[in-house]
Image (cartoon, grey):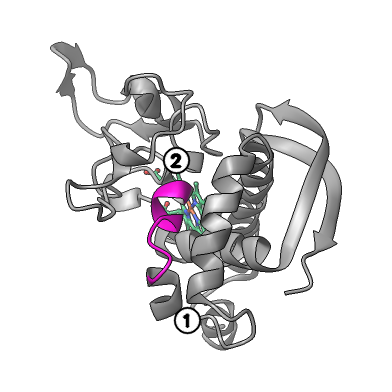
Amino acid sequence: MLDAMLTADDVNSDVELQDFCVAMMFAGHDTTLSTMQSVLYWLSKQPAVIAERRQEVLAEWDGSSQLIRETLGKVPKAKPKVRAFLQEVWTPPVTIINRNLEEEAVIDGYLVPKGWTVSFAAALVGQKVEQPSEFRMGRYLDPSGHFVDQTFEPWIYGVFGGGTRMCMGYKFARDEMLVFMVQLLRHFSFTVTSAQAIKFPLYYWRVSGTFFSNGV
Ligand code: HEM
């Protein structure tokens, strides 16, 4: 994207390029980096889940062949796991999404005037399920055990926002998280020695710890 913008320099001013780089830094980099830390935090609390998912990864990926979408698809429980980490109290990094109303709107029976800013609490949407602090994989699976993708239902899954301004990189972000988890489970064990909940500007667990190679 940046290459395309740089070559089209008659169209994009330096200010636009700067704006784009800052947006990608926060929107594309910091979100996934903070989520990876939250994943380490939550995984460290669930040794049984690590063991179970590791078996799944060992069965489907030799650890050296190229990691492609097909391989990721064969680790079926990883997707709902990523979703669980991002939802509920599992620290969705962007907690509030704002919209400025260009025209008045009726929201939950209230008439909200044009020009007002409406905030959508993505972090709270995920807590509408029963016992949100418990990891229940079944919430994200249909009766035959397949992952139910509700990315485009922000009233159920608000992590990537919704509508025309929803996250542009949601698919890429999800793949990044899957690659991270599959690599982690295949090649490493880890300990988390300290964790601090960060609330702003992104919501996540900042962790310190140690990685050990599994030697596989
Ligand atoms: C876990 C990772 C990520 C999360 C939780 C996340 C979440 C979000 C949210 C909540 C928004 C605002 C959506 C709205 O207003 O409805 C957004 C916007 C955006 N995201 Fe992401 N994002 C992630 C990763 C990424 C990645 C990896 C990229 C790019 C490679 C990216 C690019 C963008 C862009 C460009 C926007 C602005 C879209 C617009 O205003 O039209 N995001 N993201």
Left or right of 142 in this view: 182: right
Instruction: Identify the disc placed on residue 2.
Output: none
Mark 2 falls on what kind of element? helix
Classify 10 Å Cα crowding around label 2: few (below 14), some (14-19), many (20 and above): many
Residue 100 position within the rendered picture, expressed as x and y whole percent measured from the top left: 35, 32
State the residue position of label 2.
Answer: 84
- The total number of labels drawn is 2
Which of the 4 image quarters holds residue 97?
top left
> What residue appears at the point 65 percent right and 26 percent down from the top-left corner?
199
Magenta residues, start to end: 74-81
Label 1 vs label 2: CA separation?
22 Å
Tell me what residue is drawn at x 41 percent, y 56 percent: 79
Q: Pinpoint residue 17: horizontal percent, then vertical percent.
A: 61, 68
144, above or below 195, in the image = below
Check disc 1 and give the amino acid type. Answer: Ile
Mark 2 CB lies closer than 8 A to ligand 1: no
Q: Disc 2 residue type?
A: Ala
* Front residue of this view, candidates 174 and 57: 57
Q: Quadrant of residue 161?
A: top left
Looking at the picture, tell me which residue is in the foreground, 209 or 35: 209
Q: Can residue 7 be seen in this view?
A: yes
**Residue sitting nearer the eye, 70 or 114:** 70
Residue at image point 70% right, 29% down: 198
Task: Identify the element where label 1 is drawn.
Answer: loop
Q: Is residue 95 magenta?
A: no
Label 1 with label 2: CB-CB less than 8 Å: no
Rendered view: 7 above or below 48: below
- Dot placed on the residue nearer the N-terminal end, 1 or 2: 1
- Residue 68: mark in rendering: 1
Q: Position of residue 32 (x, y in %)?
A: 60, 53
Which residue sits at x=55%, y=33%?
91
